Image (cartoon, grey):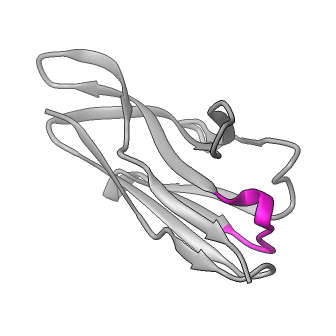
């Protein structure tokens, strides 16, 4: 059974930084695209950043130049480095990955979410 477990959320002041991590575990053959999403209260979930299996990246306009997505394939882990945080970045952040697992083949998996709060 494949699981994604996030860590690194918390409370930070405006202008501060946080680094989120998301580790995949289980009987994994390979991992394709990995994404970070976020959902603020009363809003729809939105994609924040994407990194492909070939390390190509893309970002939402609202975070370009402030957030950096990266991955460590040896650790089956994706990261989101968030700098110059703003109050409007406050949300629950979710990782998402397309994973080829033993017995079940390719599937779309989600983490449980981690809260990021930007406030003074």
Of residue 117 and residue 105, the one placed in the foreground of this image is 117
For the N terminus, which image quadrant? Answer: top left
Q: How many marks?
A: 0
What is the quadrant of residue 72 in the picture? Answer: bottom left
- 8 left or right of 26 in image: right
In this picture, is 110 found above or below 95?
above
Q: Confirm whether the magenta stretch covers residue 87.
A: yes
Task: Read off the magenta span.
Answer: 82-90
Identified at 67% across, 59% down, the residue is 90
Q: Confirm whether the magenta stretch covers residue 70.
A: no
Of residue 2 and residue 38, the one placed in the foreground of this image is 38
Identified at 11% across, 17% down, the residue is 103
- 32 left or right of 118 in image: left
Of residue 42 and residue 73, the one placed in the foreground of this image is 42
Residue 109, how many percent across, how many down?
A: 36, 30
Residue 20, how many percent across, how many down?
A: 51, 64
Residue 30, how many percent across, how many down?
A: 32, 33
- 96 left or right of 64 in image: left
What is the quadrant of residue 66 in the picture? Answer: bottom right
In this picture, is 69 found above or below 40?
below
In this picture, is 35 found above or below 65?
above
Residue 120, how many percent across, how many down?
A: 74, 84
Of residue 100 and residue 59, the one placed in the foreground of this image is 59
Identified at 81% across, 54% down, the residue is 63
């Amino acid at each position: 059974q494949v699981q994604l477990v996030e860590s690194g959320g918390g409370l930070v002041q405006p202008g501060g930084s946080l680094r989120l991590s998301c580790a995949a575990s289980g009987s994994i053959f390979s991992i394709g695209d990995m994404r970070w999403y976020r959902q603020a209260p009363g809003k729809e979930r939105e994609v924040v950043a994407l990194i492909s299996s070939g390390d190509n990246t893309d970002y939402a306009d609202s975070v370009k130049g402030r957030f950096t997505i990266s991955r460590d394939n040896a650790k089956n882990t994706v990261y989101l480095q968030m700098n110059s945080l703003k109050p409007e970045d406050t949300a629950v952040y979710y990782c998402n990955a397309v994973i080829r697992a033993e017995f079940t083949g390719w599937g779309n998996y989600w983490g449980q979410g981690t809260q990021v709060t930007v406030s003074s």
